Image: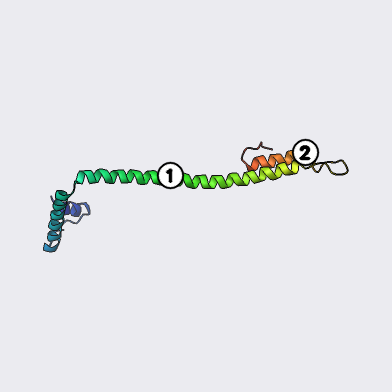
Amino acid sequence: MSEWESVAKEFELPNFKYKRDARVQRMADEIARLQAELSKHYDVPRLQVVEDELVKVKAELQLLVKDRDYHIVENARLARVNEVYKSALELISAGVRPDGTYNRSREACEQLANEALKSGGCGKET
């Protein structure tokens, strides 16, 4: 049974008989001839090895790009967290007012510190 007859059977086309016309057959013969000619001039197994290695390198490159993109985003996030920490510490470390009182109470400083820690993903649950 030819390939086309098996396809016809698979799709339940009982009276379907496919015959290659002369043009299709010439094209198939030309492809076979060109493949044979190509294999004479080029080391086809070596080309396959090179192609396989290119596929591996492409996959590694995609992983590196994905990793780089992750680090770009993570660096931006950490820069924002650092700014929150810095502003919290600047407010907490503010000196005494001229009247001898502090700018922030201990409870306010604790709340500010907890908010800063939460924004960095390491704060305690309240």
Which percent across, then down, holds residue 55? 32, 46
State the residue at coordinates (22%, 54%). 11
In the image, 120: left or right of 21?
right
Q: Which residue is mark 2?
A: 107
Three-letter amino acid code at the position of disc 2:
Glu
The single residue placed furthest to the top in the displayed view is 124
Which residue type carries mark 1?
Answer: Leu
Viewer-proximal residue among 120 and 13: 120
Determine whether the residue tagged by mark 1 lies in a helix, strand or loop. Answer: helix
Report the residue that reaches farthest toward the right. 99
What quarter of the picture does the C terminus occupy? Answer: top right
Residue under label 1, please give it.
Answer: 64
Which of the pair 30/48 is nearer the observer?
48
Q: Is residue 95 visible?
A: yes
Q: Tell me if residue 17 can be seen.
A: no
Q: Quadrant of residue 23?
A: bottom left
Q: Earlier in the sequence, mark 1 or mark 2?
A: 1
Residue 86: assigned label: none
Local crowd size for mark 1, using a 10 Å CA cut-off: few (<14), some (14–19), many (≥20): few
Residue 32 placement: quadrant: bottom left
Residue situated furthest left in the rendering = 22
- At 68% from the left and 43% from the top, the residue drawn is 86
Image x and y of residue 54, in percent = 31, 46
The label nearer to you, 1 versus 2, is 1
Left or right: 21 as drawn, with respect to 73: left
